[in-house]
Each structure stands twice: as C-alpha cells, then as structure tokens.
Image (tube, grey):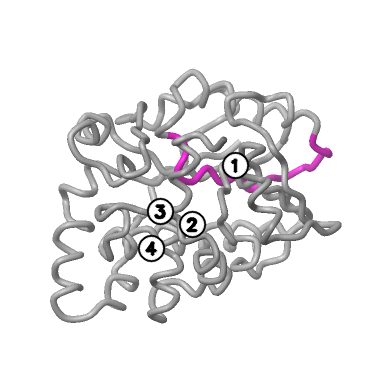
Amino acid sequence: MMKNESKTLYIPLYGKAFVSQKGIILEDKKAEEIWEKEKFPLGRKSSSKWLAYFMGMRSAVIDNWVSEKLSEKPESAVLHIGCGLDSRIERVKAPFEKWFDVDFPEVIGIRKEYFSETEKYKMLGASASETAWIFALPDFENAVIVLEGISMYLSEEIIKNLFAALSEKFPSAKIIMDVYTEKAVKASKIKNPIQDVGALPSFGIDEPSVFETEKIKFSGEIEMTPEEKINELSGFEKMFFKKMFAGKFAKNLYKIYTYKV
C-alpha cells in the first residue's frame, strides 16, 4: 500500500503533464502519457493550474541544473532520490555514466510499468532514511544527486545521515534539494495542496549551512521561478503568478539549495 507521502508524487506528475499539454514551461510527453493512464484523484488545491505552473517550473529549473553539471562532468553517476514517476531521465539530454532512480519499492513497482531499465539506467526500491543501498552502488568518482520534493517529509537527522553517506561514497558530488522553510511547515498545517492526499510536511530549514560538514559545503540558492519561465504565461496569469508564486512571500516559504562534496 502506498504511503501518503508517496501519493504526493501525483501532484508534480499532474503539473508536468498539464504544462506540457499547453506547450509551455516544460516538454514532458512521458508525464502526459502516465497521467492519462493513472489519473489519480487529486483535490481542488493540488490540481490548480497555479500549482501546476509552479511544479513545471521547479522541474525545469532542476533539469537545467542537472544538464549543466553533467556537461561539466559527463562521467558522473546520477542519483534521483525520491524520483516518483518523474521522467527526468528522458528530459535531460546531457551524457552521463549511469543513472539511478530511487524511491520506495511500491513506487518503483508502479514506475516499472512505464520505464525500462538499460545498462546505463537502473531503478532502485529504497528509502532515503536508510543508507545501506548507497554503499551497495558501484563506485564512481563523481555524482550528480537530486532530492526533489522529499526533504520536507524527512528530518534534519535523516538528511544529515543521507548527506554523510553520499559524501563518504562519492569523492566528488553535486547535490540539489528543494526545501520548505520553517514558516512554510507551520503554514502547511493550515493550508497546503498535499493535504489532498493526506500528507503533511514535517521539516523545514531556514539556514542551509545546517548540513555543512568538513566534506559537504553549501554552494548556493537557485531561483525556483525564473523570469523566462514566468514570461511563458500570458496576461492575467503571468501577473497573478508573479505576485503570488514568485514574489517575496512565496520565496520565504520554498527554496532550492545546492551543495557540493
């Protein structure tokens, strides 16, 4: 049975399918295909077009970051931890050494209905709260690691343990992770689209350096709603989105941080 936290994967899936069908922000025919077959019953908040635009932009921004890092070091392994039904493996065109999509076994079971493993692409049923699977991976000098939409369901201790394992396994790594702030977690108890699937975030961070160690360093914050993506909207939608989802209030709730090993 799928955990409520895992059910949140259908929210970004819908968002990516929605914007892809409109021909804006993100091209993702695979998301369109999967959503057409899954059609998970979302609530009014989790299926709003505003959230769909936001989910599409978040994915596009992370895609660009992954592509940039792989262009710098194409011999890297990619780890997408908490991959859900995301098709980044198909959207990113940059070369890589090997790609691992990781999520709970029940999620990977569904994922295997839509994706096929190859010599360079593998799917792993594992939890971010455990680390043994990381040390069972083949050795790579470099890694590009994505944690998208999962940090808010973990804890500071779990993320620190995960980062420690990743930094021990890979001599060099780049990590990208979207996070809720503490303010966002408090606000989510009152109103958050993920409540539609019975989930609630439990962890937010205001200071990204909390995860720094001798090996791991905070390397920067990335704009989640870049101007060029907002400009793909038009008229009232562009004005409203810019004010409500890209303004100062929204930026105080939700962020994308990057780290390096």
Question: Range of the magenta residues?
Answer: 137-151
Residue at (45% x, 55% y) in the render: 40
| Front tag of 3 and 1 | 3
Mark 3 residue type: Ile
Q: Mark 3 points at which residue?
A: 11
Q: Is residue 218 above or below residue 176?
A: above
| Front tag of 3 and 2 | 3
What is the C-alpha distance between the residues marked 4 and 1? 19 Å
Mark 4 residue type: Met
Q: Give the number of callouts.
A: 4
- Which tag, 1 or 2, sits closer to the chain's start? 2
Q: Mark 1 points at which residue?
A: 81
Mark 2 residue type: Ile
- Which tag, 4 or 1, sits closer to the chain's start? 4
Q: Is residue 218 left or right of residue 69?
A: left
What is the C-alpha distance between the residues marked 4 and 3? 13 Å
Q: Mark 4 points at which residue?
A: 57
What is the C-alpha distance between the residues marked 2 and 4? 9 Å
What is the C-alpha distance between the residues marked 3 and 1? 17 Å
What is the C-alpha distance between the residues marked 3 and 2? 17 Å
Residue at (19% x, 64% y) in the render: 242
Q: Position of residue 57 (x, y in %)?
A: 38, 63
Residue 62 image label: 2
What is the quadrant of the N terminus in the image?
top right
Q: Is residue 194 left or right of residue 149?
A: left
Residue at (47% x, 59% y) in the render: 13
Q: Position of residue 196 (x, y in %)?
A: 31, 44
Q: Position of residue 239 (x, y in %)?
A: 14, 71
